Image (spheres, helix red, strand yellow):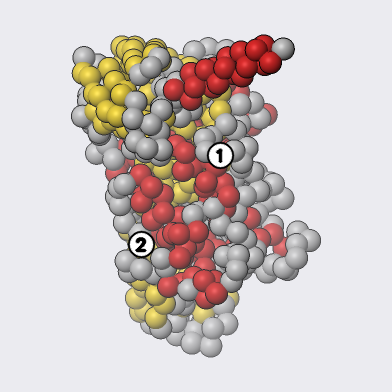
Amino acid sequence: MKLRVLLVFLVLLVSQTVVSAAVRLPKVLGDNMVLQREKPLPIWGWASAGEQVTVTFAGQQKTTQADAAGSWKVVFPAMQANDKPQVMTIAGSDTIQLTNLLIGEVWLCSGQSNMEYTMKLHPKYAKPAKGIDSAAVDMTKLHPGIRIFNVEKVLSKPDVTSTGWNECSGEALEAFSAIGFYFAKDIQRELNVPIGIISSSWGGSRIEPWTSAEAYKTLPAFSAELQSEPFKVDEVEPGKNYRSMIKPLAPFALRGVLWYQGESNCINHDGMRYADKMQALIEGWRKEWGGDQLPFYSVLIAPYLYTKRKDRLPHTPETLPEFWEAQTQSLKIPNTAMAVVTDLVDDLGDIHPSYKWEIGRRMALIALANDYQKNVVSQGPVFKEMKVKKRQAILSFDHADGLKSRDGKTLSWFTIAGADGQFKPATAEIKGDKVVVYAAGVKKPAFVRFAWNEAAMPNLINKAGLPAVPFRTDALEWKYTANNFIGAE
């Protein structure tokens, strides 16, 4: 009997040793993946301490040794795009073979429900409206140039929970981010290279769980929070989603990040504080990926009747515009840009704007213009300066080529005030590349506001059909420094 027990113990010990010696990879490295072109390619994983690991790919071979903790990593030199499936072999005490690998462009998309919003939910919006094509998609059809990786909403460690990389069709596509897919579809059509999209989103989430505590602690704006134990930002513990759903993806090589989040922080009355939180998020993620210029593109959250909600904090019609202001100020961070969606709302009581394919297209325009040097207009009119001439305020804009009214009607949602700050509805007229604003009751204009209301769906666009960014000229001027957003009169 004792001998049998001893034999069982030895068998278990040997089996455990074999398991611990097995070479392992993170979920983001797997069959069907797309690897980022024109950037160094890190490949990493785990093995027994001191174990030799050899990775073979694209005619090259890299060998390393697992450290004392069992971690190992090799880095292949940058490669050109390749749409012909390749094989990668990782060999240690055992061998892993990854098949059907492509080289192209890889983007990570994240945020809350508007980014999570899946293709399966999309068909109910597949109808022409507002002059925008419905872009209906047969999800049983394979989109061979696109591969998708969906991170599940599980707070797992040390790796993400996922079914891995999938070819783009069927159930995998149905469960994937609609914005992520349409972004990939447009990019792939323009570049004609493979596109890999990683989606890691969670409906209803705030920005704080997506940001590491360390990133907050480096910014003076959050110095007061350092006194709290445990460390919290506006009553929320940072890092929960970041640790489980973002950090394990690094250092997988990316071209950039798409971010669509903010509704939950607007509900919390973040206002300008959200600009600081965006700084922490962006700088924290860039540090994780080792690149302080990693492109980071976001979406201005949509018009919505927050005043109709029964939240802990009551809202005014200006709660949302003040949040828009913070989102706009965060664009002072280098290598950022933003898609505006004020024209894509059918129902102001629905926090999810309908036309996800158009949002994906607008984000693709930003990437095509900024990262791929394509000659496309990617931004709507952005307020630049105001001059006063007699009773008129004359507004200048960037991205103002071909200013016009989207619906052919008089320009909407402009208000004007004198030094007393009493805003009145204004008449606004396009004069070349400028907008002239005036009102009968304002003799000496001092301030102009545009779309400064949660219900504002204004009609000022440029010739590319992209809407103007909401603004107010009576705001504090904010500037970005390496450490913080600083306000000044």
Of badges 1 and 2, nearer the viewer stands: 1
Of mark 1 and mark 2, the one earlier in the sequence is: 1
**SS of the residue under disc 1:** loop
The answer to whether mark 1 and mark 2 are in CB contact below 8 A is no
Q: Residue at x 49, y 54 (%)?
A: 212
**What amino acid type should be assigned to the residue bearing mark 1?**
Lys
For badge 2, the amino acid type reads: Lys
Q: Is residue 102 above or below residue 366?
A: above
Q: Which residue is at a point 27% across and 36% down the rendered structure image?
A: 372
Find disc 1 in the rendering and name its residue. 157
| Disc 2: CA contacts within 10 A as few (<14), some (14-19) or many (>=20) | some
Q: Which residue is mark 2?
A: 332
Instruction: For residue 322, say whether it is visible.
Output: no
Indicate the quadrant containing the N terminus: top left, top right, bottom left or bottom right.
top right
Left or right: 448 in relation to 370: right
Q: Is residue 420 above or below residue 72?
A: below
Taking 168 as reference, is 128 left or right? Answer: right
Q: Which mark is residue 427?
A: none
